[in-house]
Amino acid sequence: MSQSFGIVEEKLREAEFFLDELCKTNRRSFQAQCFFSAFASAARSVTLALQATMSDVDGFSDWYEQAQARLKLDPLARFFVEIRNDSIHKGLNPLDRITMEHLREDLSLQLRRRAPSHVIVCLTKEPRMELF
């Protein structure tokens, strides 16, 4: 192992930190957008750190190839890869960018006094809203 596995653990802690901070913010704030962007980037970098620290371990390449194949089929993993790529490569941050269609639902949830949540909308052929 050319680098310490602690690098992977630190990346996981970094992603967790930004997610925790995001959960504490006002859902429509600039801080929320910053923490979301940082979370997406840190979460993505976990697998990169894993590759960097484990690449010379026997059997890792075969294991990682299988893990990548599973991740490519996982809708949630693909969802976050797209978000991270849009954030890093296009400067887009989908946090709280909602369409009129979703605004009604969001306002309805607020009127029913649902706990505040963050909204992620991906503008694809099938817009979707994720609440967390």
Image (cartoon, grey):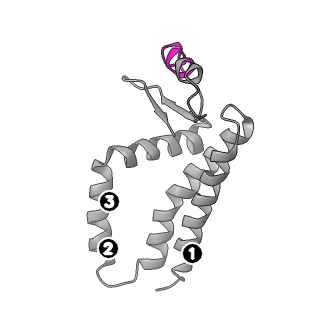
What kind of secondary structure does the magenta stretch mostly adopt?
helix
The percent coordinates of residue 46 (x first, y second) are: 50, 64
The answer to whether 61 appears left or right of 53 in the picture is left
Which mark's residue is nearer the viewer, 1 or 2?
A: 1
Is 118 displayed left or right of 126 in the figure? right
Give residue 125's quadrant in the image: top left
Amino acid identity at mark 3: Gln
Pick whichever, 47 or 2, lies toward us: 47
The reply, left or right, for residue 132 in relation to residue 60 is right
x then y, percent, for residue 73: 27, 48
Mark 2, residues whose alpha carbon is within 10 Å: few (<14), some, or many (≥20)? some
x 55%, y 30%: residue: 114
The answer to which of marks 1 and 2 sits earlier in the sequence is 1
Near-viewer residue (32 or 84): 32
User: Which residue bears the numbered disc 1?
Assistant: 7
The Cα–Cα distance between marks 1 and 3, rounded to whole angstroms, is 20 Å
Of the residues under marks 1 and 3, which one precedes in the sequence?
1
Q: Residues within 10 Å of mark 1 (few under 14, many from 20)?
A: some
Residue type, mark 2 in image = Ser
Location of mark 2 (residue) = 61
- The residue shown at (44%, 71%) is 51
Establish if 98 lies above or below 58: above
Residue 68, numbered circle = 3
What secondary structure is marked by label 1?
helix
What span is colored magenta in the figure? 97-107
Q: Nearer the viewer, mark 2 or mark 3?
A: 3
Q: Are marks 1 and 2 in contact (CB under 8 Å)?
A: no
Front-most of residues 84 and 112 = 112
